[in-house]
Amino acid sequence: MDTLQRQKLDAMKELAYGASHEINNPLANIATRAQTLLRDEAHLERRRALEAIYRQAMRAHEMISDLMLFARPPRLEIEPFDLCNMVESLVDGLADECQRRNIRLAVDTPAPMELSGDRQQLHVAVKAIVENAIEAIGQDGAVGISLRQVASPATGQSVKIEMTDSGPGISAEARPHLFDPFYSGREAGRGLGFGLSKCWRIVTDHGGTVEVESGAESGATFVIELPVGGPEEG
């Protein structure tokens, strides 16, 4: 992630935080009124219409929650945990959805790998990329996750989480925008929303990086790199 991209996303997060408060109030009002009307509505078609209103209001509320997490994430709760165990738990949670779509989700984890970080937030970050891959594939494909430790004089000891999918490729033009909130790489079959933006925010808050490697034709690999010792103080 280059400096310009970081500055652009930092500006977006401030706008997002202010807008979220203004949008949440009318959404809560709509959802509450729809629920109230549903209690006394016996007409089948009107009930369906009110249920649709309620569902869409709650969907928008969830999007605002994602926006808030991107704009002002909760304070990191740093503690050592087993990264392999976290990834295996994530894979177990997505097994039913992958089976329904006939997508093979494979994970290659070594022996226990300790990392200092916020387990819950990093779970959200990794899951966002895997879910993005599942949505990009749609039906009949594969997603692979691998973990390894790396070391360099510049970064010290770190871990890499590589997630490779058989979905559509990502063009060179689309790649710089993938972590923008609400960016839709429609030509690449990549979704619209905050998933990748949340991932970027959580990973960079941990002092890490997230990169994407892809040809224009097919497949993509997202690589998260995190310092083993957690984010630096300051």
Image (cartoon, rainbow, N blue to C red):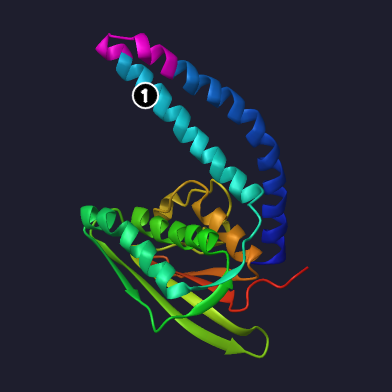
Determine the image quadrant of residue 136.
Answer: bottom left
| Magenta highlight on residue 43 | yes
Q: SS of the residue at dot 1?
A: helix
Residue 142, given in percent of the width and then of the height, sits at 28, 66
Q: In this picture, which residue range is highlighted in magenta? A: 35-46
Q: Which residue is mark 1?
A: 52
The number of numbered discs placed on residues in the rendered structure image is 1
- Decide if residue 6 is on the left or right side of residue 146: right
Q: Quadrant of the N terminus?
A: bottom right
Regarding residue 173, the answer to whether it shows in the image is no
80 relative to 49, above or below: below
Q: Quadrant of the C terminus?
A: bottom right
Q: Residue at x 47, y 80 (%)?
A: 113
Report the residue that reaches farthest toward the right.
234
- Decide if residue 102 is on the left or right side of residue 207: left
Residue 19, given in percent of the width and then of the height, sits at 66, 35
Magenta part, dominant SS = helix
204 relative to 37, above or below: below
Q: Residue at x 43, y 68 (%)?
A: 86
- Along the line of sight, the residue nearer the viewer: 145 or 25: 25
Q: Residue at x 40, y 84 (%)?
A: 111
Report the residue that reaches farthest toward the bottom.
153
- Along the line of sight, the residue nearer the viewer: 71 or 39: 39
Please, what is the three-letter code of the amino acid marked with disc 1?
Ala
- Along the line of sight, the residue nearer the viewer: 225 or 36: 36
Residue 124, given in percent of the width and then of the height, sits at 49, 57
Q: Residue at x 71, y 73 (%)?
A: 232
| Magenta highlight on residue 8 | no
Residue 126, given in percent of the width and then of the height, sits at 47, 63
Regarding residue 223, the answer to whether it shows in the image is yes
